[in-house]
Each structure stands twice: as structure tokens, then as C-alpha cells.
Image (tube, rainbow, N blue to C red):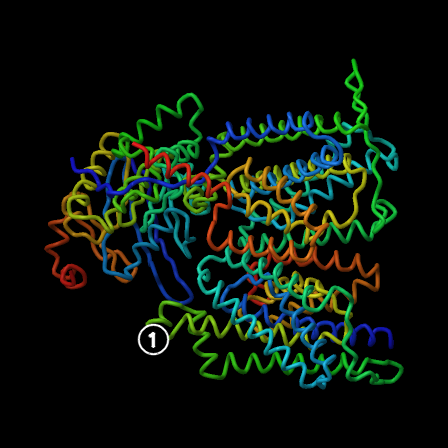
């Protein structure tokens, strides 16, 4: 598999506080990676450095072999590195269709193809039935899906998903896992997923990176990670 | 040589008087983030209340605190009826306080009339330093401004009331968790700001002829003072900001006309804000 | 496959552009028929209020569509007024009516683009932007006072009513009726252009900035450039309105650039409804004509009433009259099966 994104020795310090230190990490084309860790482990800082919302103090980020460490959020988004925020961030005053339309416009889709693309994305995130509802009246779970739709509409190659199932029911969480796997397989997208929900992580069956105190604590499959006594101690034991 | 000293003294006086005029906004905008477009109207109201009470025969020294309390009460009403419902929406408070300006200006016209009014100067003499003559009242107000700013700074940094406000400014959630009544603190800060604006209007009133729009001269300047000084830096920020906006005008006016100097200062302020969005003392972003 | 849950009550209330085309046609038809039934002063003065309506639309474009508030629209208005004056009164070696209009629009556009780019590219906070637009009004007013050799200072500047030379025919703009229809046609064209703009790809992106700028940037849209362009367009429209005002009234003075006039525009648009172009146009026409009429009778109490209505609008009817009507219509529709 080709490397899509890799980071080298990524470090972020906030006025003495070390949020991430020497993180090495990579994700291949079409691959899903989960990142877990207790609160304060530096997960959101990590994803923010990849999306460009935070500048790393040290270290470099490569996308398809090119150094993108200096690029801004908006430039990285044009390359296809697009982030979903922890609290769903959509255009609340606009309908689901208009939401996706903005994402399709953001990707620079030519006028003639916009409509097709729009319908396609609405269908991918199963929003066709609610397309003309304003985002403000959608449920929390629907907004999460709509935001994933925004990422797809904007032609994301690498989905950065910060707790995509936060605030969802067990059923919705399960459906979201299926959706993400389905999307990455069908469209050959990659994804980095931060999650708390351990059942969701297990269902994803993706390689797991455990962050602890800002560092990579261990990596492996769900079985490997969950049988690691140290991991149980710092993380799983607390659940 | 005495010219240079004259300009220096003049810009110090202007700086200090402007810091006094801006102090109410520094509190309201700087601490609780209310973009108070009614700040100028509060200054105007303070000046008119001083005029009304001195005209009624009250000595100036009593009229000033009375005017400040009067404006504080108006501020309390404004806060209680409108502003407290909109703290989380800065644009709504901006527009509402502009509405307050409109209403307050017309009420002033109805109650006090539209003619120019004058408060007689309580200290008409001058202080002479060598060949320089400084109007005594302006000098006293400048010293008072400094004392008032230092008092604000003392309350903010050294008292428990100040500590509670600092906690609120730092983190509203934590402050409420600690059992702080955030809405009460907001109210106190807003009213304190109104009090300061009224006090400034009262003290400035003998230096100007009073009309219903005099406060507007200070509105935009005060905003520049507070933003250039840096939000929350009540003493040092207000003085630095006032120097850039007020004091430097005296210096520019040497080379060009007074009106054009004002234009230069505003353009300068806009450019400075672009590069120091968090204020001159906070350094570059 | 289980979909995320749908809330039971999912009817939406929305204030937005679109669906107002019919209202606009009705408004312009009424305005076109108006001089057939009335004559005199009102036919002379109504074009001026329509021009104020254009100024109001320049703000609605910025505030209603993009979510950026400007307290500086009168600054651009004055720039346009003085530009057309200087280009038509012979004080410059070149000039003429059409060149003057182009100069006014270009000047408004450039000044706004410059300020906009300077500030938005640094990502200044919204409050600072409001402050700068407020300062802009003051600077324009001060410059028009201090540069009296060009502007006439406090005495203002007189502007000749023009004659439009179309090559095959000439329209003399001295009588009220031709002036009325020329202004009406100009206002209708400006409205149509802005309406089309709000529905374009660009207009949609601006709506996205209003709704959630951070999200849009994180999808790859250069929001700062779009905001700059929106402000520039708004400045150009306000300057065009100022030029039309100068030509119509024959006179411009520093007060049309001042803070008080700038904020008056904000009041018209807030009361009429910031999210509707036709609402802003009507708001500009109705509130400014009421202001003029009632100010003559009882200036103080009228301003007081306007201030109270403004406060009530901001506190209780965020969408203004247009937004409230739209919501009312939407409720009626949803009540009917």
C-alpha cells in the first residue's frame, strides 16, 4: 500500500506544557487508523496539527511524499486533508442540500457536475430523505453524518474524524462504523479516527495507536492493544 | 526648547484626560466584552447632569459624584432590562447599546434642550512653570485621571472583588463552579463602567461646551484606546492607548492641521491594530 | 441499515434570500405607476429615497448575506458623491457623467478592497472591523471638511444635473418625471444585479461564511478573499448610490459621510430586515422618507421612537420586518394541509 500521510517526530508544546512529543505515525491509501488514549493524552492536538489548525513546535508532516508542514488549513483542505470537528460543525441556517452544495463548491467542482456530485454525496451519507431540512432541526447524529458529507463533498482523501460518534445512541454508533468502513472501501479514502467508544473501535477492526501523555504508547490490532496490561492500566481500566 | 516642553506637557494632559474618558469602556469592553456603543452617550449624560446640578446651585465638587451615580443608575437599568440577556451575543449588545445612544440622546434633548450649555470652570486660574502656562483645572483633572486609573488598577489586582472579576474573565465556567454568581458580577462590572463614564463626563464638562453629541468625539477614540492598549490591561493599556490616540495627535498637529492630524492618528491606529490585534502591550500574534 | 434519528418536529423557519422575486416585481411595478397618480414634491423627492434604498442594500449584502456589520457605508456614499462632483464640475482636467460614475464605483470598490484585504487577511476580529468602518466614516467626513479647496469644506459642493447623451437621443434630466424614471431604472438594475449575485456560487459561499466561517475555511475555501470581495462590492454599490445622490440632489456635504448617517443606514436595514435585499430597499425608502417627513414635524420624538423601535427589533425581532413576515407566511403555509 502507498503511504498517504506520514508524520515524523511531531511535537507540540504550549508554554511549557507538552501536548505531543516525538510522535511518528503514518496512514496508507485506503486505510483506517484509530487513535485512542485517555483524556489529555494529546489526541485532539495531534489531529489539529495534521489538519493545520495548530502549528507543530517540531517535526514534519508529509502528504503523498510532499512536506506540508508549512501549509495552512485551507491549503491542506484543498489537497484533501479535511477534518470533522468534535462537536458537529455544519452550516446550521442552511438545508442539508445547501450544506453539501457549499462543500461541492469548495472543492472547485465545475458547474455542470455540481448537481450530480451533490446527489451522490447526499446518497453516500444517507441524507437524501432530509435534504431539504435545515441543519438546525436535524438531530445531533444526523449533523455528524452531514458533516462527514461535507468532507466527502469537498473531495477529502484523508478524513480526520474527531469523535464521530459523540452523542450518538448505540444504534447510531454502530451505523456510523458501518458507514465509515463502507466509504473508505468504496471510495478508497483513508481516515484517522479519534474515539472514546471502545465498542466502536473494536467494530472498526482498524490498527490502533494508543497515545499517552502526548507520546505513542503502543500500536497494534484491537486484540493486541486490549491485551496489553499497561494499556488496560492507563486507559481501558478506567472505562 | 520651551516649545518642546509645551508640546510634551500638552500631550501628557491630553493622554491623561483621554484615559479618563476611555476608562469606563476599558472596564465594560475590556473585562466583560460588551462593545458599548452607548459609551459616548454616558459621557454626555454625565456632563449634562453636572450642568443641571451646578446650575441648580450645587457646588461642583458635589455635582461630580452625583452625576457619576446618576449615570451608574441609568447603566444599571440598561443592564437589567436589556444587556444581561445578550452577554453571549456581542453583536446584539453592540446594536442595543447603539439604540441606547439614540434614545438617550433624544431624551437629553427633551429634558435639557439642544442649546449649547456650559459648566463654569471651578478652577479658572493657570499654573505657571517658567514661561509655560497650564490651565489649572486641566492639570487637576489630569492628576485625578491618574489617581482614578490607579484606583481601578488597585481594585482589579488587589481586592477580592477584583480577584473574582479576574477569575470570571479568565474562565467563566470555572468561576461559576467556584460558586461565583456570574450574572451578578457582570452586572457590577457594567455598572462600574457606567459610573466611570459618568464620572469622566462630569470632570470633562467644564473644559467643553456641552451639546447632545459631545460624547461621540470620545466614542471611537475610546474604542481605539482600549483595543490598542489591549483588553483587560486597565491601567497600562489605557494609558499607552491614550497616548497613541490622543497624545500623538498633538505632535502630528505641529506638522499639519489639527483635523488632518486626527485623520493620521486614525489611519495609524488601524494599521497598528492590524499588526497588534491583541494590543500593543501583548506583542505580535 | 439504521439511519440517525429524525426529530419529531422538523419544520424549519428560515430567513434567507430567494422567493422574493415576486415581491420585487410588485414593488418596482408600484414605483413605476406611482407618478401617474401623484405629482409635485413627492415625485421630486422619492428618487432620493430610492437611492437611500440602494445604500441600504449595500449594507444588507454585507450584513445579511455575509454576516459582516459595517458602520462605514456612509463613508463610501460620500466618496461616490464627491467623486461624481469632481468629475462633472470641471475642477479636474478630465471627466464627464459616465466617466464620473465609473470613477465613483471604482473608488468605492478600491477603498473597500484595500481596507478589507488589509484587515481580513490578518483575520481581525469582527468587533475590530466594526470599529475600523466607524473610523472610516469619521476620516471621510474629516477629509471632506479639511480638503476644502477640493470639496468646498463645510459649504459643500454643488453638482450639475446631467444630460444623458445616448448618441441617438439626449435625455435632459431637469424635469422631475424623466429623473424619476431614470433613477427607478438604475435602482431596478442594481437590485437585479445584486439579487443575481446573492444566488450565484459566490453569493452562496458568502452565506456559508455567515453561517460558519471556520467550517468553510476547513473545507478549503479562502474566506478572507471572499470577505474582501464582498466588502469591495458593498463599497462599490454604496459609492454608486452616493454618485446618484449627488447627481439627483445637486449637492453633497461632509455630513453625508459621517458616523450618524452611517448608523442611520444600520437602523433602516435592521428594522426592515437584514436578510432580504428587497426588504432593505423598502426599509431605506420607507424609513428615510418617514424620517424626513416626521423630522419636520417633531424631530426629537421621531428620533426617540425610531431608537425604541430599533431596540425592540434587535431584542425581539432579529429578522426585522421582512424576516418576521417571512416567518408568518411560512407558518401559515405549514398550518394548511
> Does residue C23 lie above or below C283 as drawn?
above
Q: Determine which quarter of the picture holds residue A80.
A: top left
Q: Residue at x 67, y 66 (%)?
A: B108
Task: Determine which quarter of the picture holds residue A139.
Answer: top left
- Locate the N terminus of chain A by quadrant: top left
In the image shown, does C227 or A192 lie closer to the viewer?
Answer: C227
Does the image show residue B196? yes
Q: Is residue B122 above or below residue C182?
A: below
Residue B79 appears left or right of B205: left
Chain letter of disc 1? Answer: B
In the rendered image, residue B137, in percent from the top left (x then y), is placed at 77, 81
Q: For mark 1, does the 10 Å Cα neighbourhood hold few (<14), some (14 to 19), or many (20 or more) residues?
A: few
Residue depicted at 61% across the width and 45% down the height: C116
Instruction: Locate residue C325, reporting x and y percent.
Output: 46, 40
Q: Horizontal and vertical percent for residue C170?
A: 80, 19
Q: Nearer the viewer, residue B248 or A98?
A: A98
- Looking at the rendered image, the quarter that the C terminus of chain A falls into is bottom left
**Which residue is drawn at the image coordinates 56% and 56% (left, top)?**
C308
**In the rendering, at what x and y percent does residue A68 appear?**
42, 43
Position above or below: B104 against A161: below
* Along the line of sight, the residue nearer the viewer: C201 or A24: C201
* Image position of B158 (left or right of A173): right
Q: Residue furthest top?
A: C168
Q: Which residue is mark 1?
A: B178
Amino acid at each position: 500500500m502507498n503511504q498517504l500521510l506520514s508524520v515524523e517526530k511531531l511535537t507540540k508544546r504550549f508554554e511549557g506544557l507538552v501536548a505531543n512529543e516525538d510522535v511518528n505515525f503514518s496512514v496508507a491509501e485506503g486505510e483506517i487508523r484509530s487513535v485512542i488514549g485517555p483524556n489529555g493524552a494529546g489526541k485532539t492536538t495531534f489531529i489539529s496539527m495534521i489538519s493545520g489548525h495548530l502549528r507543530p513546535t517540531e517535526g514534519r508532516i508529509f502528504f503523498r511524499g510532499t512536506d506540508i508542514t508549512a501549509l495552512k488549513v485551507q491549503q491542506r483542505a484543498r489537497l484533501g486533508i479535511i477534518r470533522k470537528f468534535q462537536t458537529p460543525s455544519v452550516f446550521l441556517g442552511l438545508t442539508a442540500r445547501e450544506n453539501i452544495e457549499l462543500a461541492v463548491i469548495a472543492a472547485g467542482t465545475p458547474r455542470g457536475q455540481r448537481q450530480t456530485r451533490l446527489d451522490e454525496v447526499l446518497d453516500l451519507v444517507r441524507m437524501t430523505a432530509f435534504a431539504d431540512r435545515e441543519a438546525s432541526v436535524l438531530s445531533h447524529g444526523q449533523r455528524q453524518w452531514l458533516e462527514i458529507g461535507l468532507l466527502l463533498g469537498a473531495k477529502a482523501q484523508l478524513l480526520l474524524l474527531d469523535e464521530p460518534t459523540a452523542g450518538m445512541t448505540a444504534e447510531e454508533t454502530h451505523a456510523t462504523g458501518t458507514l465509515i468502513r463502507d466509504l473508505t472501501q468504496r471510495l478508497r479514502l483513508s481516515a484517522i479516527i479519534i474515539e472514546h467508544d471502545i465498542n466502536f473501535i473494536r467494530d472498526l477492526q482498524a490498527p490502533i495507536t494508543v497515545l499517552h501523555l502526548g507520546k505513542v504508547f503502543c500500536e497494534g490490532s484491537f486484540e493486541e492493544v486490549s491485551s496489553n496490561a499497561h494499556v488496560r492500566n492507563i486507559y481501558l481500566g478506567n472505562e | 526648547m520651551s516649545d518642546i516642553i509645551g508640546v510634551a506637557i500638552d500631550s501628557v494632559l491630553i493622554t491623561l484626560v483621554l484615559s479618563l474618558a476611555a476608562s469606563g469602556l476599558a472596564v465594560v469592553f475590556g473585562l466583560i466584552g460588551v462593545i458599548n456603543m452607548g459609551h459616548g452617550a454616558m459621557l454626555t449624560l454625565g456632563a449634562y447632569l453636572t450642568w443641571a446640578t451646578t446650575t441648580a446651585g450645587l457646588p461642583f465638587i458635589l455635582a461630580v459624584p452625583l452625576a457619576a451615580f446618576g449615570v451608574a443608575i441609568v447603566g444599571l437599568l440598561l443592564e437589567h432590562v436589556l444587556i444581561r440577556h445578550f452577554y453571549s451575543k456581542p453583536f446584539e449588545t453592540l446594536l442595543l447599546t447603539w439604540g441606547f445612544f439614540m434614545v438617550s440622546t433624544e431624551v437629553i434633548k427633551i429634558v435639557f434642550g439642544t442649546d449649547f450649555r456650559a459648566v463654569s470652570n471651578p478652577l479658572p486660574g493657570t499654573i505657571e512653570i517658567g514661561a509655560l502656562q497650564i490651565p489649572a483645572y486641566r492639570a487637576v483633572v489630569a492628576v485625578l485621571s491618574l489617581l482614578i486609573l490607579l484606583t481601578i488598577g488597585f481594585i482589579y489586582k488587589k481586592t477580592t472583588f477584583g480577584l473574582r472579576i479576574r477569575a470570571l474573565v479568565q474562565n467563566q465556567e470555572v468561576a461559576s463552579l467556584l460558586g461565583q454568581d456570574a450574572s451578578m458580577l457582570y452586572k457590577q462590572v457594567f455598572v462600574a463602567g457606567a459610573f466611570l463614564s459618568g464620572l469622566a463626563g462630569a470632570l470633562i464638562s467644564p473644559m467643553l461646551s456641552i451639546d447632545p453629541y459631545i460624547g461621540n468625539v470620545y466614542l471611537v477614540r475610546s474604542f481605539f484606546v482600549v483595543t490598542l492598549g489591549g483588553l483587560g490591561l486597565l491601567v497600562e493599556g489605557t494609558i499607552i492607548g491614550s497616548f497613541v490616540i490622543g497624545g500623538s495627535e498633538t505632535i502630528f498637529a505641529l506638522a499639519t492641521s489639527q483635523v488632518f492630524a486626527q485623520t493620521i492618528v486614525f489611519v495609524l491606529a488601524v494599521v497598528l491594530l492590524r499588526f497588534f490585534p491583541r494590543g500593543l502591550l501583548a506583542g505580535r500574534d | 441499515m439504521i439511519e440517525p434519528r429524525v426529530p419529531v418536529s422538523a419544520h424549519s423557519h428560515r430567513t434567507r434570500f430567494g422567493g422574493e422575486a415576486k415581491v420585487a416585481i410588485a414593488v418596482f411595478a408600484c414605483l413605476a405607476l406611482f407618478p401617474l397618480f401623484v405629482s409635485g414634491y413627492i415625485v421630486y423627492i422619492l428618487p432620493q429615497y430610492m437611492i437611500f434604498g440602494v445604500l441600504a442594500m449595500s449594507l444588507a449584502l454585507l450584513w445579511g448575506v455575509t454576516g459582516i456589520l459595517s458602520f462605514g457605508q456612509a463613508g463610501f456614499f460620500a466618496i461616490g458623491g464627491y467623486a461624481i462632483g469632481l468629475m462633472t464640475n470641471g475642477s479636474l482636467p478630465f471627466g464627464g457623467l459616465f466617466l464620473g460614475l465609473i470613477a465613483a464605483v471604482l473608488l468605492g470598490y478600491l477603498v473597500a478592497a484595500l481596507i478589507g484585504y488589509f484587515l481580513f487577511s490578518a483575520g481581525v476580529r469582527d468587533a475590530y472591523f466594526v470599529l475600523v468602518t466607524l473610523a472610516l466614516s469619521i476620516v471621510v467626513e474629516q477629509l471632506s471638511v479639511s480638503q476644502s479647496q477640493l470639496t468646498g469644506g463645510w459649504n459643500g459642493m454643488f453638482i450639475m444635473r446631467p444630460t444623458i447623451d445616448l448618441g441617438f437621443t439626449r435625455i435632459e434630466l431637469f424635469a422631475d418625471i424623466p429623473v424619476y424614471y431614470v433613477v427607478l431604472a438604475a435602482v431596478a438594475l442594481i437590485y437585479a444585479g445584486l439579487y443575481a449575485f446573492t444566488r450565484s456560487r459566490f453569493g452562496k459561499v458568502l452565506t456559508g461564511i455567515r453561517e460558519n466561517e471556520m467550517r468553510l475555511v476547513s473545507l478549503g475555501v479562502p474566506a478572507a478573499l471572499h470577505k474582501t470581495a464582498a466588502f469591495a462590492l458593498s463599497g462599490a454599490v454604496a459609492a454608486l448610490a452616493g454618485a446618484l445622490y449627488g447627481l439627483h440632489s445637486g449637492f453633497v456635504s461632509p455630513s453625508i459621510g459621517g458616523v450618524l448617517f452611517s448608523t442611520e443606514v444600520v437602523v433602516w436595514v435592521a428594522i426592515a430586515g437584514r436578510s432580504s435585499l428587497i426588504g432593505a430597499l423598502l426599509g431605506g425608502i420607507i424609513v428615510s422618507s418617514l424620517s424626513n417627513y416626521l423630522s419636520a414635524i417633531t424631530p426629537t420624538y421621531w428620533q426617540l421612537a425610531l431608537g425604541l423601535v430599533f431596540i425592540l427589533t434587535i431584542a425581539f425581532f432579529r429578522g426585522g420586518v421582512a424576516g418576521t413576515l417571512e416567518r408568518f407566511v411560512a407558518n401559515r403555509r405549514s398550518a394548511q394541509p
